[in-house]
Image (cartoon, rainbow, N blue to C red):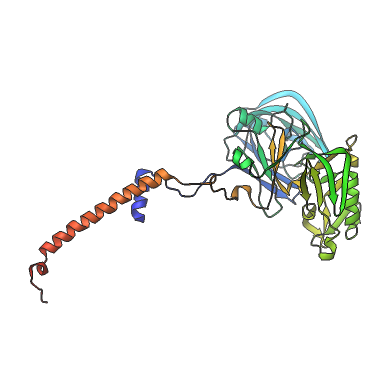
Amino acid sequence: MIIIFLFLNYACGTSINLFRRQNLAQNNFSNYLNIQYYGVVKIGTPPQEFTVIYDTGSGELWVPSVGCIGCHNSKYFTVEESKTVEVTDYVVEIQYGKGKVYGCVVKDYVGLPQSNIHSYMPLLLIIREAEIYGLQSDGVMGLNNDKKVPNLFDLAQQQGLMNNSIFVMQLNQNPYQSRIYYNISEQKLNNGTQWINSTDDEFWTIPVQQAQILQYIINFNETQFAIIDSGTSDIMMNEEIYELVLGSLLKVCKKQLGIIFCPCNPNENQKQYLPDVIIISNGIKFNISYYSYIISTNPQNDYCQITLSSNKQLMNNSNFMIFGDPFLINYITIFDKENNRIGFQDSNLGIWDDSKQYYDDFTIDFTGIFWFSLIAYIIIIGGLFYYNQILSKVQIASPSGQGHSIQL
């Protein structure tokens, strides 16, 4: 039967797959110390590959240009090698919290690995980089909530290459794989998602009405706001929250040159002073676990650096906090610019695409099974009929059928 099946499958082209996987469109991230996550982007014709941080806290795409001053990279975009690049006279400076870049605006095709996304869009070729230390990627791809600046997924939707412009980030701690997903079905998006409308038209921002540290509860008279920023390596929190957390941490942690180091693997006695940070937004409780805000790679004598800081350094923005990668590690985060909302699903350190969705992810090709069954049935019946015919002829010709025996 197996031989018959293989023959029919080859000859007739019948596709029989009882567990055909419907993979989500996705791009894998590289992970540096659980504080920088970056993936590949392709620019130009023929495409030149770069690694970029997929940054929900900014809006521009930039990569270094050949001849860039102060750039740390080994990869640089070469204008002469792209047949589709359009160079403009615009020069732009982008200021980040920890540095800035300066470059010229060009237009070219941008795409993702193993994807049909191929969008013509503006980007910045950096000719001078200043004070951005420790950046592991070649550049940055902005994915903020600015409606006036379409990102790669917005353009792909406008071109009909995607059903929607929604993208989903799952940032995991090592050694689990981190990814960005896009072109996602409504059923997947609404699978237990808790939605919060963004309070800002430029940044992905949620309101914060309350915080809890151990048994202490902080109620804000004036609503605080938190920017969900995948391009930030720490959590910059309200001063009142930060001081409360710090007061508990320093009972078992140590401070060296202004940096807080806490036990990487605390014992039971130490754990009581290493609190999770609980944030309440529109009635939804978010838990920032202790293990997500320490850098567990390369510890110093079993002590790990924490990634918490105060927002005092943010001028004129004392009611704004920034929730970077240590926050995102705890959740699968959905960014829906069209509906101005952010969705959150619980993350169990697994891969979103590997969860079993019996009605979505696995289908049965009933057409293939029908034809295979029909042909197999005909062959079996034909084989039995043929066998009976041969057996009848043998019995007629057999001496034993005529009452004789054969003696050897």
Residue 362 screen position, x and y as percent:
51, 47
Query: Does residue 42 appear in the picture of this structure?
Result: yes
Quarter of the rendering containing residue 194: top right
Residue 379 or residue 407, whichever sits in front: 379
Relative placement, left or right, of 387 versus 273 is left
Query: Does residue 184 appear in the picture of this structure?
Result: no
Relative placement, left or right, of 159 versus 134 is left
Looking at the image, which residue sits at the far front? 283
Labels in figure, total: 0
Residue 314 screen position, x and y as percent:
88, 38
Identify whether 14 is placed above or below 79.
below
Residue 374 screen position, x and y as percent:
33, 47
Residue 90 or residue 202, whichever sits in front: 202
Residue 386 screen position, x and y as percent:
21, 55
The N terminus, quarter of image: bottom left
Quarter of the rendering containing residue 168: top right
